[in-house]
């Protein structure tokens, strides 16, 4: 571990760049964030919620960039788009 990592305040970790994750790692990370979403929203400090929101946006943006033609389940639609 480098000196800057040791001296960094808790909670300032940004995570691995989503573009550097393999597909299965990207999906695993998204799943983890979605599992912890409600608890972070309801009980996490503001900094944790802000980090959660930022990281979710980064990972979801990467997923959509990789899968622009993703399959949409027609049963999930609430109206015609």
Image: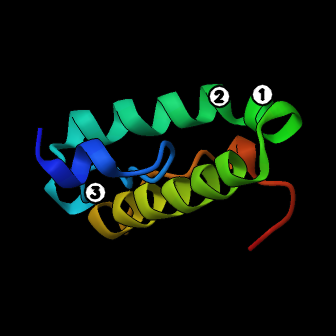
Q: How many other residues sit within 10 Å of disc 1, few (<14), some (14-19) or many (≥20)? A: few
Indicate the position of residue 30 as horizontal and vertical percent values: 46, 39
At numbered mark 3, what does the secondary structure look like: helix, strand or loop?
helix
The residues bearing labels 1 and 3 have C-alpha atoms spaced at a distance of 23 Å
Q: Indicate the quadrant containing the N terminus: top left, top right, bottom left or bottom right.
A: top left
Q: How many other residues sit within 10 Å of disc 3, few (<14), some (14-19) or many (≥20)? A: some
The answer to whether the residues at label 2 and label 1 have Cβ atoms under 8 Å apart is yes
Up the image or down, 44 lies above or below 20; here it is above
* Mark 1 / mark 3, whichever is N-terminal: 3
Up the image or down, 66 lies above or below 41; here it is below
At numbered mark 1, what does the secondary structure look like: helix, strand or loop?
helix
Residue 38 picture quarter: top right
| Residue on which the image places disc 2 | 36
At numbered mark 2, what does the secondary structure look like: helix, strand or loop?
helix
The residues bearing labels 2 and 1 have C-alpha atoms spaced at a distance of 6 Å
| Residue on which the image places disc 3 | 18
Callout in the foreground (1, 3): 1
Query: Which one is nearer the viewer's eye here, 77 or 65?
Result: 65
The answer to whether the residues at label 1 and label 3 have Cβ atoms under 8 Å apart is no
Up the image or down, 38 lies above or below 49; here it is above
The structure's colour scheme is rainbow
Instruction: Residue 72: give its label.
Output: none
Q: How many other residues sit within 10 Å of disc 2, few (<14), some (14-19) or many (≥20)? A: few
Indicate the position of residue 46 as horizontal and vertical percent values: 77, 52
| Residue on which the image places disc 1 | 39
Q: Indicate the quadrant containing the C terminus: top left, top right, bottom left or bottom right.
A: bottom right
Q: Is residue 20 left or right of residue 18?
A: left
* Mark 3 / mark 2, whichever is N-terminal: 3
Which residue is found at the position 55% from the left and 36% from the top?
33
Indicate the position of residue 80 as horizontal and vertical percent values: 80, 69
Q: Residue furthest bottom?
A: 81
């Amino acid at each position: 571990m480098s000196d800057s990592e040791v001296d960094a305040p808790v909670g300032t970790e940004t995570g691995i760049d989503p573009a550097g994750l393999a597909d299965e790692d990207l999906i695993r990370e998204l799943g983890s964030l979605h599992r912890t979403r409600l608890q972070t929203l309801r009980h996490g400090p503001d900094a944790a919620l802000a980090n959660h929101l930022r990281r979710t946006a980064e990972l979801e943006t990467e997923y959509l960039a990789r899968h622009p033609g993703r399959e949409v389940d027609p049963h999930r639609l609430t109206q015609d788009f």
